Image (cartoon, rainbow, N blue to C red):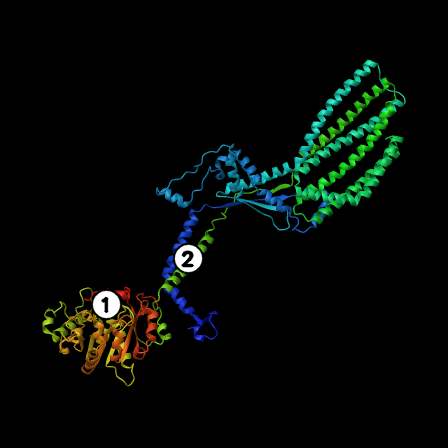
């Protein structure tokens, strides 16, 4: 047998303490396995209960079907040559994770609310479990309903008006809790999964969520364009009114003054003024549009982002101020050349083209500088980078437009001063004609911007593309039958093992025969546990016993009583005794023959004349061992006397069918002078009994008296073997007193009953250990446990405490 020692040292033990104070524990793996195997039915029962509960949970739990849609998020920086995109692409992922924004937004409550609103307005509303219009009925519920223990309805929720925002929000929160979004590494693809008790509904919810986010993304992207479109539309309406007013004023004045056209220098001057004024108004219109866009962007930025934008603007401005001053100087030279030669001059057009190229190059440099500053700042979200970059570029463009408007305003004032030198009639006509041309030009410019914004809104498709719509799944995601059964099996085995461990920890009885070998006990015999119901007398044995009784006492063979209403061998009124003479060929009888043989050779060179049979607890079987051991010796022809020294709970008179009194107590108390008259015959001619006698108030004094010792010596002289039945050790001192008067002590023990701690205490008693011949070991009541099933007997003792020994009245 393999042992695996585990030594645990108490580190709080002082160094001067002896080594035996260290706690050492040995774990016997084989013993543990035998223990678990012995309790296998308990473990199997717990495991079966656990599996039953797992199956009950499986068929009563609401299933979860998950349907997945595949969504691709396009790059918002789609234009080629965008300086910001490559700068952001090389930034660490800890600084920027654009897909994380989409995951958070898509699983947010606003998107769930939008999806819920769309579904609630759809025709399929009345078939969705999300709105309480449909309920999953488990097989357990259907079984209970079939048995009449429970009723159910497929639709048991009332319709909720869409105006109840709180209820709609609850629906949205319910949907939000069902959403799972995964982003495969290093891709711009999202797997959007929504769960439901029904596979069709899972697909519907997943597709509705994706469509809601797609529409919301388009709304977010076109929000700025819509804001600018609305502003331009308002400006266009006002400009249209101005056009009508100016046209009416000009036509009325021409008709009144009978004027058709200007001539000479006045006409050329007016054309220059109209060109400059129209250009000035276009710049101002574009400036107003950019100002509106800038106001929209600033509302989207947080305070921290605005501060970051201001710092970047100051840094970029300081780096590019020299280039900007050079462009301003070129703008001033252009204005002078324009004033001198006019807009139609090839030189003027070439200078304008040169300035535009310089501004384009500056714009690229500015975008690069902004991207560099943003990357260096290490902010976390890409959406913030886009807004901040656009705000900074808009600020710079506004500064350019303000400077251009200022220069064109100066040139406009110059031409107006020259126009004012004309005669009043020509001056008024020129002013009206100028106003008409300017407002028409401005109207045309605004109309162009309006159409551009409308086209941008109409062409906005967003960044979200539904690559693969969701379809109803074929298999449920949970509960998983295999996983639930596996968990139930593991949990059942674990709980069963733990229960066995707890029971064994609370049970201090001896479980294995190996215990006696490990603690220095000699096992003289292994007696199987026997159920009297299976241990019956054969007919031939009954006849032999009856003839023997007639030989011993003819009166008893004729049915006469022996004084207590029972014949020898008849047994007690509460149950028949268990004796080897009932079935001499049984393993039970054979075990006592082994015990007899081993006792005979227990003391080499010193024959045993007296043996004290005792135990450590009540109902261990010591009295049965004592009676059958006496019969075993008697069958060999020896004269054997059984002395019942258990004066508190005597039982030998019941086992051997004799009278309890008068007996030993009467003799020790001096009530009977002749002890030979107290000895009674039994069913065997060589076996005799000295019963306990009448109940006395001081049995301990009688057992421990000198007269008792002399009595044992006298009986050893008269009989070949004296076997004494005594109370248990450690409970009553009677057995300890008798131990000094006999040749040896036979200890009775029973597996799964005898307390191992009491056996260890017996080993510690110095005056008992030398007298201890060995142990008569009775098997376990579990016939197929610990190997005692080979005897073919079963049965069960009921454990009795020490107090039961004292409290039980004598009989």
How packed mark 2 is, by other alpha carbons closer than 10 Å (few <14, some 14-19, many 20 or more), is: many
The quarter holding residue 42 reads bottom left
Q: Is residue 447 left or right of residue 569?
A: right
Image quarter where the N terminus lies is: bottom left
Report the front residue among 333 and 96.
333
Q: Earlier in the sequence, mark 1 or mark 2?
A: 2
How packed mark 1 is, by other alpha carbons closer than 10 Å (few <14, some 14-19, many 20 or more), is: some
Report the front residue among 110 and 789.
110
Vertical comparison of 508 with 736: above or below: above
Residue at x-position 43% and y-position 70%: 25
The number of numbered discs placed on residues in the rendered structure image is 2
Residue at x-position 85% and y-position 20%: 427
Vertical comparison of 407 with 48: above or below: above
Report the front residue among 136 and 13.
13
Q: Is residue 317 left or right of residue 667?
A: right
Image quarter where the C terminus lies is: bottom left
Q: Position of residue 34 (x, y in %)?
A: 39, 67
Q: Position of residue 242 (x, y in %)?
A: 75, 22
Q: Position of residue 317 (x, y in %)?
A: 77, 43
Q: In this rendering, which labeled residue sits more in front, label 1 or label 2?
A: 2
Question: Is residue 161 visible to us here?
Answer: yes
**Circle 2 sits in a helix, a strand or a loop, which is it?**
helix
Q: Is residue 686 left or right of residue 70?
A: left
Provide the residue designation for mark 2. Answer: 492
- Circle on res. 535: 1
Report the front residue among 543 and 745.
745
**Circle 1 sits in a helix, a strand or a loop, which is it?**
loop
The quarter holding residue 507 reads bottom left
Q: Position of residue 514 (x, y in %)?
A: 36, 72
Q: Is residue 779 left or right of residue 671?
A: right
Distance from Cα at disc 1 to Cα at disc 2: 39 Å
Question: Is residue 594 visible to us here?
Answer: no
């Amino acid at each position: 047998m393999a042992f695996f020692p585990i030594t645990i040292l108490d580190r709080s033990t002082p160094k001067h303490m002896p080594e035996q104070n260290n706690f050492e524990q040995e774990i016997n793996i084989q013993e543990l396995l035998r223990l678990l195997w012995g309790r296998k039915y308990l473990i199997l029962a717990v495991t079966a209960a656990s599996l039953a509960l797992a199956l009950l949970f499986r068929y009563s739990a609401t299933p979860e079907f998950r349907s997945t849609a595949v969504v691709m998020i396009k790059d918002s920086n789609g234009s080629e040559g965008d300086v910001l995109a490559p700068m952001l692409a090389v930034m660490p992922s800890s600084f920027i994770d654009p897909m994380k924004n989409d995951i958070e937004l898509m699983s947010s409550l606003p998107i769930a609310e939008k999806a819920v609103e769309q579904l609630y307005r759809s025709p399929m509303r009345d078939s969705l479990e999300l709105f309480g219009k449909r309920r999953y009925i488990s097989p357990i519920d259907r079984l209970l309903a079939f048995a009449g223990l429970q009723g159910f309805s497929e639709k048991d929720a009332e319709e909720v008006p869409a105006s109840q925002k709180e209820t709609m929000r609850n629906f949205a929160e319910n949907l939000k809790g069902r959403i799972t979004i995964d982003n495969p590494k290093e891709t711009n693809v999202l797997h959007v999964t929504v769960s439901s008790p029904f596979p069709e509904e899972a697909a519907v919810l997943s597709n509705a969520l994706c469509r809601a986010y797609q529409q919301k993304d388009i709304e977010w992207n076109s929000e700025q364009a819509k804001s600018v479109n609305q502003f331009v539309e308002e400006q266009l309406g006002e400009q249209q009114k101005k056009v009508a007013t100016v046209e009416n004023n000009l036509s009325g004045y021409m008709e009144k003054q009978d004027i058709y056209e200007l001539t000479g220098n006045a006409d050329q001057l007016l054309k220059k003024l109209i060109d400059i004024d129209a250009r000035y108004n276009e710049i101002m219109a574009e400036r107003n549009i950019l100002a509106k866009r800038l106001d929209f962007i600033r509302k989207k930025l947080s305070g921290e982002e605005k501060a970051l934008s201001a710092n970047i603007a100051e840094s970029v401005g300081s780096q590019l101020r020299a280039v900007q001053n050079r462009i301003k100087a070129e703008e001033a030279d252009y204005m002078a050349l324009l004033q001198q030669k006019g807009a139609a001059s090839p030189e003027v057009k070439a200078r304008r083209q040169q300035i535009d190229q310089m501004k384009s190059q500056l714009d690229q440099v500015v975008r690069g500088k902004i991207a560099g500053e943003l990357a260096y700042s290490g902010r976390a979200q890409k959406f913030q980078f886009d807004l901040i970059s656009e705000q900074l570029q808009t600020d710079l463009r506004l500064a350019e437009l303000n400077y251009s408007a200022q220069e064109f305003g100066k040139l406009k004032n110059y031409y107006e001063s020259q126009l004012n030198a004309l005669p009043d009639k020509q001056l008024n006509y020129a002013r009206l004609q100028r106003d008409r041309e300017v407002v028409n030009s401005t109207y045309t410019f605004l109309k162009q911007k309006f159409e551009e914004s409308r086209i941008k809104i109409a062409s906005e498709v967003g960044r979200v593309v539904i690559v693969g719509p969701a379809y109803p799944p074929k298999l449920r995601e949970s509960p998983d039958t295999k996983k639930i059964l596996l968990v139930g099996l593991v949990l059942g085995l674990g709980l069963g093992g733990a229960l066995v461990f707890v029971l064994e920890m609370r049970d201090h009885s001896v479980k294995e025969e190996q215990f006696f070998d490990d603690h220095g006990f000699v096992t003289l015999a292994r007696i199987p546990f026997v159920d009297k119901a299976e241990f019956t007398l054969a007919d031939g044995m009954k006849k032999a016993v009856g003839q023997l009784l007639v030989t011993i006492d003819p009166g008893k063979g004729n049915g006469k009583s022996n004084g207590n209403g029972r014949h020898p061998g008849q047994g007690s009124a509460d149950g028949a005794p268990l004796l080897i003479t009932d079935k001499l060929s049984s393993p039970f009888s054979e075990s006592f023959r082994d015990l007899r043989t081993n006792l005979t050779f227990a003391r080499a060179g010193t024959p045993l004349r007296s043996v004290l049979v005792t135990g450590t607890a009540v109902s261990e079987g010591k009295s049965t061992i004592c009676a059958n051991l006496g019969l075993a010796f008697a069958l060999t022809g020896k004269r054997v006397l059984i002395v019942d020294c258990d004066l508190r709970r005597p039982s030998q008179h019941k086992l051997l069918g004799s009278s309890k009194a008068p007996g030993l107590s009467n003799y020790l108390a001096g009530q009977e002078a002749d002890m030979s008259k107290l000895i009674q015959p039994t069913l065997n001619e060589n076996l005799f009994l000295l019963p306990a006698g009448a109940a006395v108030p001081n049995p301990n004094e009688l057992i421990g008296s000198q007269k008792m010792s002399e009595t044992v010596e006298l009986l050893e002289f008269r009989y070949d073997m004296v076997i004494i039945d005594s109370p248990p050790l450690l409970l009553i001192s009677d057995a300890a007193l008798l131990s000094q008067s006999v040749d040896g002590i036979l200890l009775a023990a029973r597996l799964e009953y005898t307390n191992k701690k009491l056996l260890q205490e017996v080993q510690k008693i110095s005056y008992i250990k030398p007298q201890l011949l060995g142990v008569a070991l009775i098997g376990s009541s579990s016939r197929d446990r610990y190997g005692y099933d080979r005897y073919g007997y079963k049965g069960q003792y009921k454990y009795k405490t020490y107090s039961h020994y004292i409290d039980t009245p004598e009989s």
